[in-house]
Image (tube, rainbow, N blue to C red):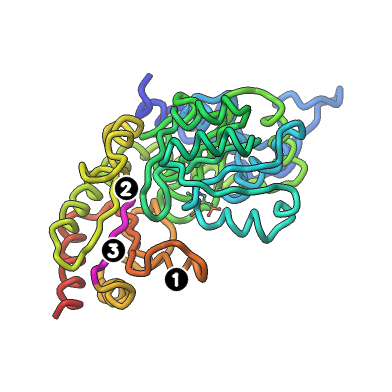
Amino acid sequence: MRQETRAVHAGRRVDPATGAVTAPIHLSTTFERAADGGYPMGFSYSRESNPNRRMLEECMAELEGAAAAPAFSSGMAAATAVIESLPPDRPRRLLLPKDVYYGLRPLLTKTDLADRFEVTHIDMTDLDAVRDACTEAAPGMVWLETPSNPLLRVTDIAAAADFAHAAGAVVVVDNTWATPLLQQPLALGADLALNALTKYIGGHSDIMVGAVASRRDDEHLARMRSAQVNKGAVPSPFECWLALRGVQSLSARMERHCRNAAAIADFLVSRPEVSAVHYPGLASHPQHDVAMRQMGGVGGGMLSFELAGGRAAAMAVAASLELITRATSLGGPHSLIEHRASIEGPGTATPDGLLRLSIGLEHEDDLMEDLAQALARWTA
Ligand code: PLP
């Protein structure tokens, strides 16, 4: 079965009680016990498991080709569970990309995880650096994020995973930007694939959910499940239901996101006000070949670009847009633009003249017209 078909059917079933084709939302927090004390339907209390969550977890596991995919109350809750559940016999050193999603930095410097893990950031697109760091640092975990945020760098998952495994490390891929429709990290050698379903999978900027797909039913997965149930960072049944609804249209949406983004990238390349366009679908992108190989021949729905006029130009262009909304986040139907350096704050490595675009589902010509009028106003 192909991913597109899987996305429509995985985890779903006709409701046995009513025949409803779309599953009901099970808001009940508690489930009846049989006279013998057991739970014949397999559910006892909603934090432990819930029919909507179970359907979503089955769906994510199938899409990622995983043994299981516990769901959490956000992408960050999922990332926290991945890191703190690292089995105790593994070294406490983590290797992360230099341009890892910026939320990971405070997680690892400002919470209790800072006392429990040592963190090294490296350029994951430089495979020599990955090999050297894996050999020298002997990490317990190697964290990949590809394409990366906001520079859209692409890491060769299979090659990096080989180096990490040779050093005995667990390999995690944050698959949020590509989604399992474009990229299947476990098939490329990763052990865990994390998705913030908040983004493309939910698809409408109205839920917060995360999930971690694990290739194996092993100790790391058991510890993540324990963190999920016993620490309690679980998504609500309604959000699980919305996420599962979102998955069903994911392939059609991704097609449109990717087509629009490719057109906008070409348009931006042609503009004199723009000094750089970061989009893996462009033949000029430094890791274009790897991206095409591991992302199903498309560049994804995200891109960023730099203005020759630096920060002032970036702020002015963003301010002049009439259709594209100035807001953080990504993966929804509406195109969003963001001046990343100012949201990431002091110490960010993001260029000051960079704007990040989450390309939505609008008509590409309307997006280009909006960008064209905003760029023209800056140069006027
Ligand atoms: N991973 C990536 C790549 C992200 O872009 C984000 C959020 O922007 C997250 C993880 C965190 O997801 P959430 O906001 O659901 O916690």
The residue wearing badge 2 is 301
Disc 2 Cβ-to-ligand 1 distance below 8 Å: no
Residue in front for this viewpoint, 251 or 84: 84
User: Which is in the foreground here, disc 2 or disc 1?
Assistant: 1
Q: Residue 172, percent across and down?
A: 55, 36
Q: Earlier in the sequence, mark 2 or mark 1?
A: 2
- Is 307 covered by the magenta stretch? yes
Residue in front for this viewpoint, 56 or 144: 144
Name the residue at 49% across, 43% down: 243
Q: Residue 363, percent across and down?
A: 20, 54
> Tag 2's secondary structure?
loop
**Residue 3 appearing in the image:** yes
Name the residue at 52% across, 57% down: 102
Q: Name the disc covering residue 342, or none.
A: 1
User: Which is in the foreground here, disc 2 or disc 3?
Assistant: 3
**The residue positioned farthest toward the top in the image shown:** 1
Asked if disc 1 and disc 3 are in contact, CB closer than 8 Å, the reply is no
Disc 1 Cβ-to-ligand 1 distance below 8 Å: no
Q: CA distance from mark 2 to mark 1?
A: 22 Å
Residue in front for this viewpoint, 132 or 97: 132
How many residues crowd around disc 2 within 10 Å: few (fewer than 14), some, or many (20 or more)? Answer: many
> Tag 3's secondary structure?
strand
Q: Earlier in the sequence, mark 1 or mark 3?
A: 3
Q: Earlier in the sequence, mark 2 or mark 3?
A: 2
- Magenta extent: 302-308
- The amino acid at mark 3 is Glu
The residue wearing badge 3 is 306
Report which quarter residue 214 is drawn in.
top right
Name the residue at 41% across, 41% down: 125
- The amino acid at mark 1 is Ser
Q: CA distance from mark 2 to mark 3?
A: 17 Å
